[in-house]
Image: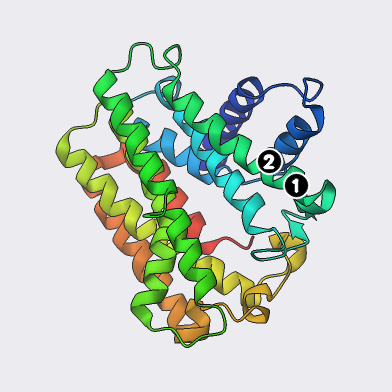
Amino acid sequence: MDFKTYLKERIALVDAALHTSLPGEDILPAQLHQAMRYSLFAGGKRLRPVLVIAAAEAVGGHPEQVLHAACALEMIHTYSLIHDDLPAMDDDNLRRGRPTCHREYDEATAILAGDALLTEAFRLLADPVVNRGIDPAQAMRVLELVARAASSRGMVGGQAVDMESEGKEVNFPTLEYIHTHKTGALILAAVQAGAYLADADEEQVKALTRYAESAGLAFQVADDILDVVGDQAQTGKDAGSDQARGKITYPALLGLADSRRRAEELYERAVAALEPLGESAEPLRQLAWHMVHRNS
């Protein structure tokens, strides 16, 4: 199967599962459920849920084993985008080429939609029905690692330091802290969740962890570069928004040329980590390539 077909099929699986995991738009409170679906089905790449599935398949697992975790990771990611876009944070007008949630609805609805998606994610991870047949210890392990990745020691902590650093001179270790926590933590959790739920052994988990750590950082370096050189029509976001807010980014600290070299180095490191897993990890290799070389 070629990678485009693989990606299309896995995204279709995730989208179908997401549709059935959330309340319908006509169920009270209707506007809240509409806002949740508005942001969740706004055309995202589904990178994190596909990473969950690809990591499971790389160690002999099947998509059905990890689909609930894949959906949970996408809900958490979407909640973070809704809140990041709010006037109190990044104050963005566009997300994925459409008005942001608070622009389409209102700030209160956007806040509640994010809160609800985060809560739904953990309800799904803890659901005894979807966890039937999964080792309870592994299910609890995944619940804890996803919670940590989304917490003040992960994504939320990275966002906090990112906001505190706006308009200030920031050193390289702080920049790496922001990106490994704000972006990298959830990507690492996605890969590890897929591995654990598919009963990966210790060496497989180590290889996948090394892959995710490098790929997650490479993804954010590429994102920083796109903010400078990307076409708004392709990225679906306000162009140059990081620079306008005085955010610390790789291009701002290293320049574009060195940032591109850094992204390539991280990509090569990620791919090298997958060598022990052989051909079963090919989708992960392709995902890493697209994370670094995408144009949106």
Find residue 191 and report its image quarter: top left
> What is the x, y in percent for residue 53?
43, 33
- The front one of 24 and 251 is 24
The residue that disc 2 covers is: 112
The answer to whether 50 is drawn above or below residue 30 in the figure is below
The answer to whether 199 is drawn above or below residue 41 in the figure is above
Judge left or right: residue 219 versus residue 116. Answer: left
How many callouts does the rendering have? 2
Q: Is residue 133 visible?
A: yes
Q: Name the element at disc 1.
A: helix
> What is the x, y in percent for residue 37?
72, 34
The answer to whether 173 is drawn above or below residue 274 in the figure is below
> What is the x, y in percent for residue 269?
29, 62
Q: Name the element at disc 2.
A: helix
> What is the x, y in percent for residue 201?
18, 33
The residue that disc 1 covers is: 108
